[in-house]
Amino acid sequence: MPESSPAAWGILHAIHCRISLARTIGLLLVAAPLSVTWAAEPPLLSEQEFLAELPVVLTASRLAQPQAEAPAAVTVIDRQMIEASGARNLSEVLRLVPGFQVEFESGHRHVVGYHGLADEFSRRLQVLIDGRSVYLPSFGGVSWSDLPVSLDDIERIEVIRGPNAVTYGANSFLAVINITTRHSAADRGGFVRATVGSNDIRDGVLRVAGGEGDVSYRLTTGYQQDNGYGQHNDSRRITFMNGRMDARPGVRDDVEFQFGYNEGPRGRGVEGDLVNYPHDQEITSRFQQIRWRHRLDSGDEIAVQFYYNHHESDEQVLSLPIPQLGGFQIPVNYDVKSERYDTEVQHIVGFGETLRLVWGAGARLDLVEWPGFLGSADPLDNHYYRLFANIEWRATPRLVLNAGAMAEHSELTGSDLSPRLAANYQLMPGHTLRAGVSSATRQPVLIEEKGNARFCLEATCTLFNQTFYSSGNLEPERILASELGYIGRMAPTLTLDLRLFRDHVTRLITGFDAAYPDSLDNEAYDFRNRDEAMITGSELQLHWQPERNSRVILGYANVRIESNNLDENYSDSAPRNSVSLLGLHELGDGLLASAAFYYQDEMTYLGEHPIGVLRRLDLRLAQRFRLADAQGEAAIVLQNVLGEQVSYNEEESIADRIGFITVNFSFH
Amino acid sequence: MTGDALNAVLLIGKKIPNGTWRVRAGLICALHRLIALAAFAAVFVSWPAAAATEVLVVIAQKSHAHEEALAALRASLADVSDNEPALRVMTAAEFSESGPRDTDQKLPGLVVTLGTDAAATVLRQKLPAPTYCTFLPQAAYAALANVSDQRHARQSALYLDQPLTRQMQLIRLALPKHTRVGVVLGPESRKSEHNLRDAAVSAGLVLRVEQITDERQLVGALHRVMDGADVLLAVPDLLVFNRNTAQNVLLTTYRLGKPVVGYSRAYVTAGALLSVYSTPAQIGRQIGEALLAMQDRPGRPLPAPGYPRYFSVEINERVARSLGIEPVQADDLTRRLAEKTTGTSNE
């Protein structure tokens, strides 16, 4: 365990003791006068309890759209699926979503792709945790290993397949991954988990949850390590801590506060390379978030949110002496720091029973300090504003129409508008058709707009190599997605979700080697809006629950990408066919068995070598038990049982079998 | 009630403006009609000269609901018998002031109370007349019967709440996939945990229980119990489920994507998925029928304490839709529920 862990333990313990003490004193103070009055005249339950009117709590404006009436296709991954999948990493769970590919560029750089167009920084997906975007403004995408969240604290994951800028803002492009953590009141007492396995897997999680009255809290701290692929220096040592507090200052108000912290070394570099030799990258990632929700008399609701994200990677490398340069050691500064301040106000208004409006506004400040790659030691900033509105109209009992738009303004790219229109028609109870057209933008990230990386090749710096030089003036990428969907309950135990889609992506920002005369090889990497792609295909999702203790979840996607392919091999960036199949069964007496199988056709991640057909099988067997007052579970997980295969890039990523044992206890 | 086969079911469904369906179901017991007719004949043939019993009705307060129950009680008496018992009505407050005697200083032959306060006021007086406590929660009567030293033959009750088996059967019928039922019990409702388990088991359901001692523990308890439950059954309690906590209960469970089965029509309007409950008119009608049945029996024993025979089911379709729950036909549901359970089942 790293040095900080005993300290974290101590803090947790101190907080818990203090709260326990406060609770005890509070109870003593409250209980004393009460017990006297109660003994005198026990109050009786009155018939008024059954007769009195109540205010309408779940008003039309507060009721969420059911899946069959949502203007987009949604895949929900619940806790049971997360556990049954055998996943040890958050990203891996997404393999269960039709059309998704999840691979590791290295042990700590996870690549999540949907409908292709993904490289090691998958920039065309939005990811939110409890409404907080974790998309990095520096190089884009999400650094999955650096999120200060434990799989144990996740309640559910909703994946919107398709753009949804109206609800989730910029970069909600090919899909949106919306992660919800458990309410802090959902757990009480302690939770510990230990995981040990092959490939140097050593994980531990400790959680303390409690509360008093209208305030509840949760503190989770943990450690995670493994050796990545095992063939390279791509190990990771992650120490994280996060906390959540929910309070209810009044019957109309909910306040939620969260913070999180993730740090530790990640292995980088290749044996034998003089510059990029094996070394560590030190990651520090943290956030604070506060959300306030207020209910109005009318049943309407106002929500205000603010969060701050901070992501820092310390990685300064001095190359080994390079003989060709007379033994000069090239200094390379990979240090990068991204900060994001974001605030949003949202108002939900109901107009009678059939019309609902959700509208709001947000503002954001991104700060990126990346001296080695942005050509400046000062942080670059970008201000960004958005305005959004969606009207949901139940035109007839069977027809629901959604119309909305997001207007955005970025200092880098100017103003854009992303409208959406969708209609859901219920053919008969349990069978709904959906047709929709939706658009979204992807804002260029700073390396694309302002990349400028230069390395001195000798002490006087007259000889240098320019690796990045962005010509700038990029416009946001744009997607226009049309879809036709069907959601049906074929039987009480069987639901089916079908979708035909056509995503037209234009102004694709593509990186390429452009002429740069002063550079060593007369080239530097530049980015331009120069490509487009047409993505068409179909998706199927089937959920079968023959009995309470068995579930089968099947996903299938057929994806075809046609592209002008000027510089990137967009056309091959998604497998033509992909399948995911999860089966789980409770065998009784607390014994649970599950298996997940994944298949995908050959494909090529952008800028990488082609990978062949992938077949992956993960197995899990878990036994629940009681030990004194604690509820325990022991599980054995075998991943990739079918054996070695190239998973991301032919040379560097050969996935092998992994096995681990995990034991957890919850106690009050 | 005996002879299920003789039960006829009366259904009146009507759409009420707030968009929810309200279905009233009455079980008209054909057997009861026969008994009532027989009683009517018997009164005429063998007891023609007998003066009608004076029944003192004590209502907790003058409210719309109490008046509605009273009107239904009168209507059900007038419906069947010419020799209807004479009703004298007063509020609990009036009773406390002037006592049970009428202007001739005569004691009533029977006292019927409507509501908890009325029962509490009357039972405290320990009258010689038999007392039928109606329109009150079972828990309230249990508490009152404990303090009162009178015997059941002189004192009985018709509860306002529904038998637990009926509520469990309702969940079974309306939500066939929701087999794990969560309940949060307070210091008072805790007493019914054993009965809840029995009712759940008999309906093929699994019960998950969280107990709390302070209202401020409610939200946490809801989160924990719903972690292993598919539907929340609201069990009325002074601490846990009441008008003040409805908002917390409904919002918390809704955010977890799980339905609430309430115990009143108001709970459904507020956001519960469905409720089974008895209207004041349904209770009034059953009181009337009990009075008529007693008229004919020597010694006039009170019926055993029991739950309402007539009940209604209400469903909030908007909430069902939002939770992605297969729409249930309320009238069909009520009919099937009536077939499964009988009102006089004692627990």
Image (cartoon, coloured by chain):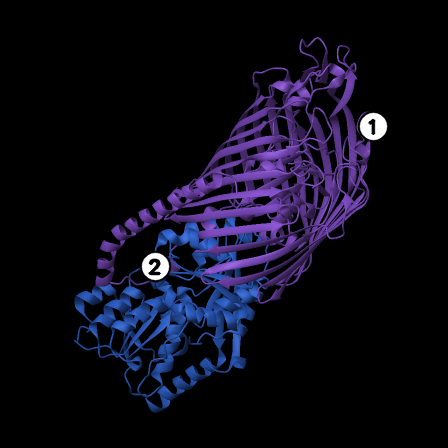
Query: Based on the displayed image, in which of its 4 quarters is residue A582 positioned?
Result: bottom right
| Residue B254 located left or right of residue B129 | right
Q: Colour of chain A?
A: purple
Q: Quadrant of the C terminus of chain B?
A: bottom left
| Residue A5 located left or right of residue A87 | left
Q: Nearer the viewer, residue A385 or B2?
A: A385
Q: Position of residue A644 (x, y in %)?
A: 77, 47
Q: Is residue B107 above or below residue B246?
A: below
Other-residue count near label 1 (Cα within 10 Å), few / some / many at <14 / 14–19 / ≥20: some
Q: Amino acid at mark 2?
A: Leu
Q: Of the residues tagged 2 and 1, which is closer to the observer?
A: 1
Q: Colour of chain B?
A: blue
Q: Nearer the viewer, residue B58 or A440?
A: A440
Instruction: Identify residue for label 2.
Output: B238
Other-residue count near label 2 (Cα within 10 Å), few / some / many at <14 / 14–19 / ≥20: many
Q: Nearer the viewer, residue A538 or A637?
A: A637
| Residue A101 located left or right of residue A83 | right
The numbered mark at residue A639 is: none
The numbered mark at residue A564 is: 1
User: How far apart are the alpha carbons under marks 2 and 1?
Assistant: 70 Å
Q: Give the total of numbered labels.
A: 2
Q: Is residue B220 visible?
A: yes
Q: Is residue A194 above or below residue A385?
A: below
Q: Quadrant of the N terminus of chain B?
A: bottom left
Contact between marks 2 and 1 (CB within 8 A): the answer is no
Q: Is residue A74 visible?
A: no
| Residue A560 located left or right of residue A122 | right
Label 1 marks a residue whose chain is A
Q: Position of residue B13 (x, y in %)?
A: 53, 62
**Is disc 1 placed on a helix, strand or loop?**
loop
Q: Amino acid at mark 1?
A: Asn
